[in-house]
Amino acid sequence: MDQIRFVDPDDFIRRLRAKKIKIREELVRGIMDIFQNKWGHVNVEHMLDRYMELFPETELPPPKPKKEKKKKGKKGKKKAKA
């Protein structure tokens, strides 16, 4: 799972759809209401902790390695042609 702590409700729904998880809208709203913080964001970290309490035998997939950024060329003055 991505290292995300809090997401807004619209982003939470969008991420579920992107993963092609078929789930009823009412259930998603209920989950968001349970794990919502005082700013209205979904606390994904708390959701994961609670899930692991209920299903401790679950093995989480290893985190995805971060892609290395390509180095950009040096910026500077170009040599003038004579």
Image (cartoon, rainbow, N blue to C red):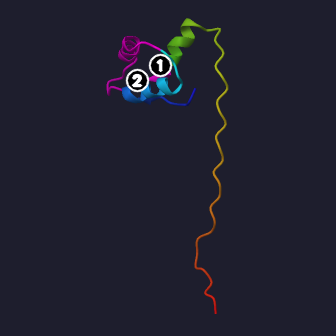
Residue at image mark 2: 42
For disc 2, the neighbor class at 10 Å (few under 14, some 14 to 19, many from 20) is many
Residue 10 rendering spot, x and y as whole percentages: 38, 28
Would you identify the image quadrant in which residue 60 lies? Answer: top right
Which residue occupies the foreground of this view, 12 or 65?
12
Which residue occupies the foreground of this view, 73 or 19?
19
Give the amino acid at mark 2: Val
Question: Which residue is pictured at 42% across the width and 30% down the height?
Answer: 11
Would you identify the image quadrant in which residue 73 lies? Answer: bottom right
Of the two numbered discs 2 and 1 in the rendering, the one whose residue sits closer to the viewer: 2
Residue 46 rendering spot, x and y as whole percentages: 47, 19
Q: Which residues are magenta?
A: 23-46
Residue 64 rendering spot, x and y as whole percentages: 65, 33
- Tell me if residue 34 is in the magenta stretch: yes
Would you identify the image quadrant in which residue 24 lies? Answer: top left
Q: Which mark is residue 46?
A: 1
Give the amino acid at mark 1: His
